[in-house]
Image (tube, rainbow, N blue to C red):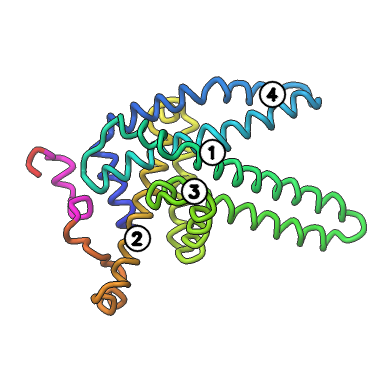
Amino acid sequence: MFSRTLKMAFWVAYDHLLKLMLINLLCILLLTPVGVFFYGAIISEDSPPFILGAVLAFGVIFGILLPIMMSGLAFMTKEIIETREGFVGSFFLGIRRFALRAIMIGLVTTGSIGALLVSAMLYVDIFSESYPLLGFTFAAFALWGAAFVALTAMYSPVTLVQKGAGVIETVKLSALLVVGNLKQTLGLALVCFIIGIASLAPPVLFLFSLAPLVVVVSSGYEMMSRRYDGLASENADDLLRRPTILYNDEEDDFLNRGARDFFYPWKS
C-alpha cells in the first residue's frame, strides 16, 4: 500500500506541478513575515518579551496559518484525485469552507504538543536529583504523546476535508488512522520529514515544500480509504489474500502508469 501511495502522489504532482508550485509560493510568501518575526525572536535576547513573541509567532504559524493553508491544499488535492482536474480556485474554496475548523484543530494540536514537550523538560528537571529514572520515564511518556499528537495532526487537514466533520470527529478519526495504520503512517511521516529537510534549500521551500506534504498524505488517505472500502465489500477475502492490491486499483490511471508515461506523456 505504501508504494502505491508514493506512486499516486508522484503522478498527482506530475500532472499538476505548475498549479501546486504556484499555490506553494503563495503560501510561503504569506508565511514569511511571521516566520521572519519568529526567527528574530528566537535569536534575540533571552528575555520574557522575546520568549513571548517567539511563542506567539510559533502559535500563529502552526496553529492558524499552516492549518488554513493545508486545508485549502487538501481540498484541491482531493479534487485532483477524484476528478483528475484541479483548479487554483479550489484552494481558496477549501479555505473558505474549512478554515475555522482547521484553526480550531491546529490550535488544539499545537497547544497539546507544546504542553507535552514542556512537560517532558519539567519532568527531567524536577526529578533529576531525587528520582532521575522516574523523571526520564515520565518524560519519555510525554515525548511519545507529543509524537502521537504530531502524527494525528499530519492527517487532520486531509481528514477534515475528506469527511467534512466537526473538530472532535476529525481529531478522533485522525487518531484512529494512526493507530490502525501505524506502518503506513510512519512511512508517510518519514517521507514528510525528508521533504522538510529538502525544504531547507530556498528554491524548494518556496516552490515545492507544503504542497508535496499534502499530496503525499492525501494519497495515503486515499489508499487507506480504498482498503477499508475493499474490506467492506464482497471481495474482502480476495483483498486479504493479496494485500498489495487495493480496491479498484485497476481503474485508477494514477496507479497504472510507468516510465513511458513520464518520458512520453503525449503518447499516454
Say whether disc 1 or disc 4 marks the residue closer to the N-terminus. Answer: 4
Say whether disc 4 or disc 2 marks the residue closer to the N-terminus. Answer: 4
Classified by dominant secondary structure, the portion drawn in magenta counts as: helix
Q: CA distance from mark 4 to mark 2?
A: 42 Å
Position of residue 147 in the picture relative to residue 182 (left or right): right
Say whether disc 1 or disc 2 marks the residue closer to the N-terminus. Answer: 1
Name the mark on residue 54.
none
Question: Which residue lies at the image location 49% right of the left edge and 45% below the top edge?
Answer: 193
Q: Quadrant of the C terminus?
A: top left
Q: CA distance from mark 2 to mark 3?
A: 16 Å
- Percent of width and height locating residue 23: 36, 29
Name the mark on residue 103.
1
Q: Amino acid at mark 2?
A: Ser
Q: Are marks 4 and 2 in contact (CB under 8 Å)?
A: no
Question: Which residue lies at the image location 18% right of the left edge and 47% below the top edge?
Answer: 259
Residue of label 3: 154
Question: Which residue lies at the image location 46% right of the left edge and 44% below the top edge?
Answer: 194
Residue of label 4: 41
